[in-house]
Image (tube, rainbow, N blue to C red):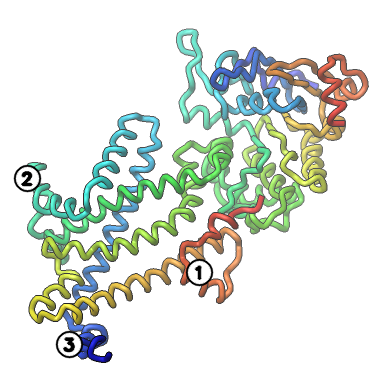
Amino acid sequence: MTAEVVMRAADVHKKFGRLEVLKGVSMDVSTGETVCIIGPSGSGKTTFIRCINHLEKIDSGRIEVNGHLIGYRQSNGKLVEDSERNIARQRTQIGMVFQRFNLFPHKTALENVIEAPLKVLGHDKAHAVDKAKVLLSRVGLGDKLDTYPGKLSGGQQQRVAIARALAMEPALMLFDEPTSALDPEVTGEVLSVMEELAHQGMTMIVVTHEMGFAKEAADRVVMMDGGVIIEEGTPEHFFVAPTHERTKQFLSKIL
Amino acid sequence: MHYLLASGVDWHVVWVRIGHPNHPFFLALTRTVYIAVIAQIMGVILGLFAALMRMSKLRIFRILSGIYVWIFRGTPLLVQIFFIYYASNQLLGFTLIPNSLNVGLFSLDGAIFAGILALGVNEGAYMREIVRAGIDSIDKGQMEAATSLGMRRGLAMRRIVLPQAARVIIPPLGNEFNNMLKNTSLLFAIGVYEMFADAEIGYSNSFQPTEYFLGVAFWYLVLTTVWTFIQAAIERKLAASERGEELSFRERWQEAWNPVSTRMFSGGQAR
């Protein structure tokens, strides 16, 4: 694997009021790598992933994607929040898939996918539609182009959301617990789309409890607890010989 | 019994007022409608801007928006109408309200202009709250999803949040317009010849209050009823596009009589 770093987080701290949810998180993710972040609720994993595309501000530390500082710029040695225009531009490189899908309910599946390429990248409509059709077919929804989200199942909605993020051709995909709002019988269809994506070389950071997915697709698993990373290694490491007591406890609950 | 009920009411006059209205009355009716429509459109636009200002990062915008609502919701509409018509020129030091407004072939009486302005500005203060509630009702995840795709907040507001908020805004907006149709009657007090003025003048010439006021009440009821049907049609269209289907005739009928559709809030999107 070429060791080109796509995402680098260095000593990220984040507080909500007086509650410190991230207490110095550092992580590098290289091109083509798939990293799963696991951990109990309240461990800061969702907050961390939301910091990567600046949905949350950070209090100290730095996050870079493709070598660009995210959400901030350096001014006299201090970090100040970047302009909205620059943050928006950086986000086009970072795809985000949400736990609750957040599809646009007033737009069809196809319209959801072409919205940002048309309005943000300025692509022409024919091109955007062609690409969206390919993407929706790839996630198995080639027959649902004109269907509104309200008429799709949770699993189908999440696959549209993945296609919508991919339409921007991001360098990095973030998944925030993409299957935890789904019925158990449809998580599989979403996970297999994600596995395929990982095998095709997409760089992905996935907050998940699906150890099956981790085993199948992840290059690395990161365990967070109490706002820090307490253990990381290959999926096999976590299945066979987790070292940290907290990790053992956590895995025994979810496996 | 017959005597008690009718007690000197000339039912023929009532019937003429309802069934065979004269030409001045129709002019007055038209005026009532266009004043209400223009003032309502103005109210929606002002309300939208005031709502966006209310959510602005800049404190001065938030304060201005607050003062606007504070004043126009806190004083009587009739006082505002009189103030704008009689006092605003003096207060501002320039002619806001001309004697008559001429744009090409189109000419508008100063009182009508002042009346539209007063009704519109007053309505904007109420619309701000309705628009804001509509925007607030949209899940925060919509803005997050849009901005995560690289949309700036303004674009996301216009393309993603406002179209969804419109569905929530339309039912109370319909009620506002219903009020607006009736509130135009206040303009008779500054000499606008609208429907109520027509009735009032008829009454003072004939001293037949029941006949004239019953007649005009009937016509207000016609206007608000017609509007109820139009509103139901608009809501049906919005709801249908969201759910991707049309309604049955029976549902349309029910909705027409119960236009503030609770479906909008409960049936929304399946999760």
Q: Is disc 1 placed on a helix, strand or loop?
A: helix
As drawn, the residue found furthest toward the right would be A240
Q: Which mark is residue B255?
A: 1
Q: Which mark is residue B90?
A: 2
Residue A99 falls left or right of residue B4: right
Identity of the amino acid at label 2? Gln
Question: Closer to the camera, A56 or B65?
Answer: B65
Residue contact at pointers 1 and 2, CB within 8 angstroms: no
Up-down relation of residue B256 to residue B177 (above or below): below
Q: Chain of mark 2?
A: B
Q: Is disc 3 placed on a helix, strand or loop?
A: loop
Picture coordinates of residue A2, whole percent (x, y): 77, 20
Picture coordinates of residue B109, whole percent (x, y): 12, 63
The disc, 1 or 3, on the residue closer to the chain's N-terminal end is: 3
Q: Which residue is mark 3?
A: B8
Query: Is the residue at mark 1 from the same chain as the one at mark 2?
Result: yes
Residue contact at pointers 2 and 3, CB within 8 angstroms: no
The disc, 1 or 2, on the residue closer to the chain's N-terminal end is: 2
Identity of the amino acid at label 3? Gly
Identity of the amino acid at label 1? Glu
> From mark 1 to mark 3, how far is it between C-alphas?
41 Å
| Quadrant hosting residue B3 | bottom left
Which residue is drawn at the image coordinates 30% and 30% (left, top)?
B60
